[in-house]
Amino acid sequence: MARIARGAGGRELVFDSWGDPRGHPVFLLHGTPGSREGPRPRSLVLYQLGIHLIAYDRPGYGGSTRLPQRSVAHAADDVLAIADSLGVDAFSVVGRSGGGPHALACAALHPGRVRSAGVLVSLAPPDAPELDWFEGMTESNVREYRNARENLEVLQATLVQNADAMRADPMALLTDLDHEMPDVDRQVVADAGIRNMLRQNFLTGVGKSADGWIDDAVSFCKPWGFDPGDITVPTLLWHGERDVFSPVGHFQWLARRIPRATVVLQPSVAHFAAVPVLPKVLGWLREQAKTAAPEATTV
């Protein structure tokens, strides 16, 4: 059942949790667009892994209060607010796709609380030196992020229209992207279980407005508010080499930037393969958290 924590200024942060309440706490940071209802392992799997999985709606998505002009860095304090409301001291984070930069923010800005981080198919910062940010990126994403940088009115009009279409048909986004997806991505999203999770994810995320989607896009395209090179906690970077939504160049830049990151590049998969790989990543996070801070408490 969804619960509410309070962020800075009294903002509502709607979150939920699954799995073993006494297991290792892991915050799952959802993709773009998305919500706390994003794809996740079943509760039985989470119990077997010893994981207490927590997810929340980023500001402007689902039931969470919008935070105008938010940066990627703002997610770090929101996650801390939820952790504090639960009495959780030490935890891990994992972010997939649009959640990846926000997981990086938590790891960079709160190393005293974050024990390990997983970052799956993430973008790199827009000001990343020696990175051609748009190289290898699908046309729809290039258009969205260029509008986020250069034409906010067009971005807002486009994403409001897209959100309206998704309220009528939650799978409209995937239908629109079908011609841009590699075959390996189509195979993943054809799975009935994954499609059901994505349907609820999208419907919850943009059910009230496109605000969160708009704010995510803008935040990715301005300074993030931290340097990934400052991350010191154990961090797993995972990517599919055939990804056209977050191109592999972004992964390679992050791999060079983050000291001692564990890097996994899968040559035969693409963006949506980050969904079925999540249980393995959660197991890695749990074990790394034990190694990083054996004395850390869990609830």
Image (cartoon, rainbow, N blue to C red):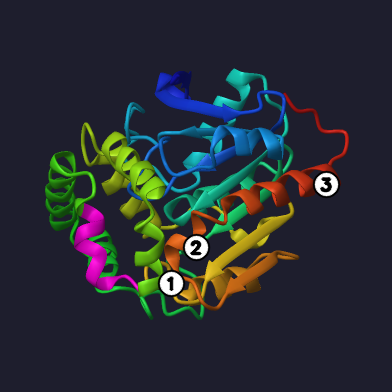
Image disc number at residue 121:
2
Q: Is residue 137 magenta?
A: no
- Between marks 3 and 1 in the image, the one whose residue lies nearer the viewer: 1
Mark 2 crowd level (few <14, some 14–19, many ≥20, 10 Å Cα): many
The residue at the point 82 percent across, 33 percent down is: 296
User: What range is drawn magenta here?
Assistant: 173-182
Residue ID for mark 1: 243
The amino acid type, in three-letter code, at marker 1 is Asp
Q: Is residue 179 magenta?
A: yes
- Quadrant containing the N terminus is top left
The residue at the point 23 percent across, 49 percent down is: 171
Residue ID for mark 3: 292
Camera-side residue: 110 or 194?
194
Structural distance between the alpha carbons of marks 3 and 1: 31 Å
Camera-side residue: 71 or 64?
64
SS at circle 1: loop
